[in-house]
């Protein structure tokens, strides 16, 4: 069977992960600006949920439609359907052409957010991940780690909040714990202290991403 990680040879996927309020968007914006300034080509930015027409519809449904109370199982199914489209129609073709995709969230979000402490949900996700994506994983994951109390303070300053932004502190504590557990298991996940000054944080992130790009 095709080992999907071999696809990561020339082109590859880099992901950003972290709880809401960890400052992902700010760091990704800085990266986009830097690549633009340096005129670096063949790097594509995307996000999840999103990345395809269907993905954007799922985003709206999950993040904005407060009339539907989705179970975690249904959330997993919707997110994976959207990821499958995103992966096959956007990510994979770029990687096959030796391009680099940088995604704001990917598979680790579903584990951290939807699975909680529930082994049954984790087993469902693991099975579907294998069936749909084989062993495909990002080459590098930047995990922005932050104390959930600080993250919630940041979220509360936002004007527009989505349904996940309205979750409780204990929900974010579990999400953070899940992320850190994954980081202990997977070498591709590099943990950064997101409470650092944002320029300093960006220098650290940029160093590791540039190293990965230069290795190609
Ligand atoms: P963001 O794009 O501002 O980070 O918001 C996306 C929200 O969607 C965030 O609260 C996390 C949530 N989410 C999940 O719960 N599971 C997933 O698999 C993904 C991709 C996102």
Image (spheres, grey):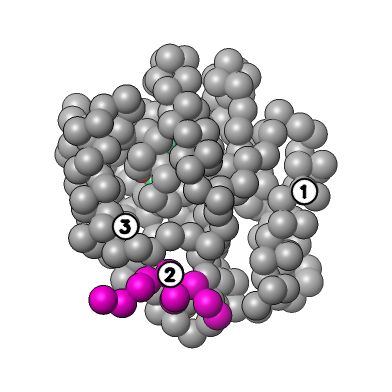
How crowded is the residue under tag 3: few (<14 C-alpha within 10 Å), some, or many (20+)? Answer: many
Task: Name the residue rendered at 38%, 64% in the picture.
Answer: 136
Secondary element type, mark 1: helix
Q: Quadrant of the C terminus?
A: bottom right
Establish if 56 lies above or below 89: above
How crowded is the residue under tag 2: few (<14 C-alpha within 10 Å), some, or many (20+)? Answer: some
Ligand 1 within 8 Å of the CB at mark 3: yes
The residue indicated by pointer 3 is 83
Q: Which residues are magenta?
A: 1-10
- Asked if residue 3 lies left or right of residue 157, the reply is left
Ligand 1 within 8 Å of the CB at mark 2: no
Is 3 inside the magenta-drawn segment? yes
Mark closer to the chain start, 1 or 2: 2
The residue indicated by pointer 2 is 5
The residue indicated by pointer 1 is 204
Q: Position of residue 108 (x, y in %)?
A: 42, 45
């Amino acid at each position: 069977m095709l080992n999907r990680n071999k696809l990561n040879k020339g082109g590859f996927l880099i992901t950003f992960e972290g709880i809401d309020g960890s400052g992902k968007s700010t760091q990704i914006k800085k990266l986009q600006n830097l690549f633009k300034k340096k005129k670096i080509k063949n790097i594509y930015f995307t996000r999840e949920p999103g990345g395809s027409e269907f993905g954007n519809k799922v985003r709206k449904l999950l993040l904005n439609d407060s009339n539907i109370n989705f179970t975690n199982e249904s959330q997993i199914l919707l997110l994976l359907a959207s990821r499958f489209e995103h992966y096959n129609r956007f990510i994979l073709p770029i990687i096959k052409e030796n391009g680099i995709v940088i995604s704001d969230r990917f598979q680790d979000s579903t584990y951290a957010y939807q699975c909680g402490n529930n082994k049954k949900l984790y087993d469902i996700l693991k099975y579907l991940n294998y069936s749909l994506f084989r062993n495909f994983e990002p080459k590098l994951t930047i995990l922005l780690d932050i104390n959930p109390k600080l993250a919630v303070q940041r979220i509360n300053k936002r004007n527009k909040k989505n349904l996940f932004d309205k979750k409780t502190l204990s929900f974010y504590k579990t999400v953070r714990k899940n992320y850190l557990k994954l980081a202990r298991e997977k070498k591709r996940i590099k943990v950064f202290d997101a409470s650092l000054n944002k320029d300093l944080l960006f220098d650290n992130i940029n160093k590791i991403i540039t190293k990965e790009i230069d290795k190609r």
